[in-house]
Image (cartoon, grey):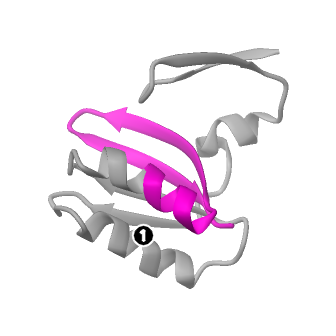
Amino acid sequence: MQIVTSAWRGETSALDSDPAAIYPRAMDVTQDIDAIGLLCPWPVLKAQKALREMASGEVLCLMATDPVAFIDVPHFCEQEGHSLLEVEEDGSSVRYYIQKA
């Protein structure tokens, strides 16, 4: 059993699962999108465009600095059926790991 902390929500949960499912960095990221410096709605629009061309199950890493992306990206994933695997704060930017539905 592993304890995983979701830094973006401050939550902790016990998970019995494959490490790749918990830590996207252990998986192959299919595509990286650099949306650093772009404001709403551009980070989500760039992610949406990239995901259209990806196969189901592939992982997108979206890097953004827009504070609104913290709300927009999870909402986008929920609406489109994609899985938001992890949100990782890295200094002034945030990385969103999205698995295509």
Q: Is residue 21 left or right of residue 8?
A: right
Q: Is residue 87 left or right of residue 100?
A: left
Q: Quadrant of the N terminus?
A: top right
Locate residue 87, reporting x and y percent. 46, 40
Secondary structure of residue under mark 1: helix
Locate residue 7, reporting x and y percent. 44, 25
Locate residue 44, reporting x and y percent. 36, 66
- Residue interval drawn in magenta: 74-101
Q: Is residue 38 above or below residue 14?
A: below
Q: Amino acid at mark 1?
A: Ala
Q: Is residue 18 above or below residue 10?
A: below
Residue at x 33%, y 44% (from the top left corner): 70
Locate residue 34, reporting x and y percent. 31, 63
- Mark 1 is surrounded, within 10 Å at the Cα level, by few (under 14), some (14 to 19) or many (20 or more) other residues, namely many
Q: Quadrant of the C terminus?
A: bottom right
Residue at x 75%, y 34% (from the top left corner): 19
Residue at x 42%, y 69% (from the top left corner): 47
**Where does label 1 land, which residue?**
47
Residue 49 falls within the magenta-colored stretch? no
* Count of number-bearing discs: 1
Q: Is residue 10 above or below residue 61?
A: above
Q: Is residue 60 visible?
A: no
Q: Is residue 14 visible?
A: yes
Residue at x 35%, y 34% (from the top left corner): 89
In the displayed orientation, state which residue is furthest to the front. 79
Q: Is residue 40 left or right of residue 78?
A: left
